[in-house]
Image: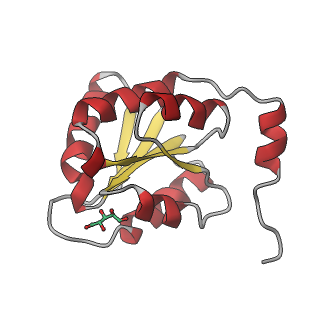
Amino acid sequence: MKIGICSDHAGFEYKDRLIRHLTAEGYDIEDFGTHSTESMDYPDVAHPLAEAVENGDVDAGIAMCGTGNGMAITLNKHQGIRAGLAWNTGIADLVKRHNNANILVMPARFISYEEAEAITATWLNTEFEGGRHSRRIGKIPVCGK
Ligand code: RB5
C-alpha cells in the first residue's frame, strides 16, 4: 500500500517519525513535505497530496498541522477527497468505518507522537462498513457549483 504524507512546520517532527515507523512496517511512503520546522503555508503541501490521492498515484494520505483544521479544510476542497480529522483512536475507527476517509488528518499540537502512531494504526487497520454509509458518502459531492 502506498501512502502519501504531508505536514506543515507544526507537524514536521511527527511526520518524520511516522515516515520511519510506517516504512519499517512495510508501507511505501511518498513524502509531500514540508521538509523542516521553518514556517510555511499548509495549502502548499495539502493540494499536491489531495491530487495524488484523487489521481490514484497513492492509495491514501496522512496530513498533519497544528490543529489539523487547516489541512482538513484545504483537502476537502477536492471533490475526490474525504479528509477526516481524528484526535483519538475512537474517532480514527469511525472516520474509516463510517466516513471511509481517504486522508487521515491529525492535530500535531494537541496529541502526543505515540497517540499519532496509534490513531494511524487504527485508521489503517479498520475496514469501511459500507451499507447506509455508502449511500451517505454518495451524497457528499457537490455538483455544478
Ligand atoms: C501554524 O501555526 C498553524 O496555524 C497550523 O499548523 C494549523 O494549525 C492551521 O490550521
Q: Is residue 137 left or right of residue 37?
A: right
Q: Is residue 58 left or right of residue 138?
A: left
* Percent of width and height locating residue 91: 51, 35
* Percent of width and height locating residue 102: 57, 44
Could you tell me which residue is drawn at 39 percent across and 55 percent down? 68
Q: Residue furthest bottom?
A: 145
- Give the colour scheme shown: secondary structure
The residue nearer to you, when weighing 94 against 39, is: 94
Count of numbered circles in the view: 0
Q: Is residue 3 above or below residue 114?
A: below
Q: In this view, does 27 lie above or below 43?
A: above
Could you tell me which residue is drawn at 23 percent across and 36 percent down? 113
Q: Is residue 56 left or right of residue 14?
A: right
Q: Is residue 7 above or below residue 131?
A: below
* Percent of width and height locating residue 7: 32, 55
Q: For residue 131, what is the image quadrant?
A: top right
Could you tell me which residue is drawn at 80 percent across and 38 percent down? 134
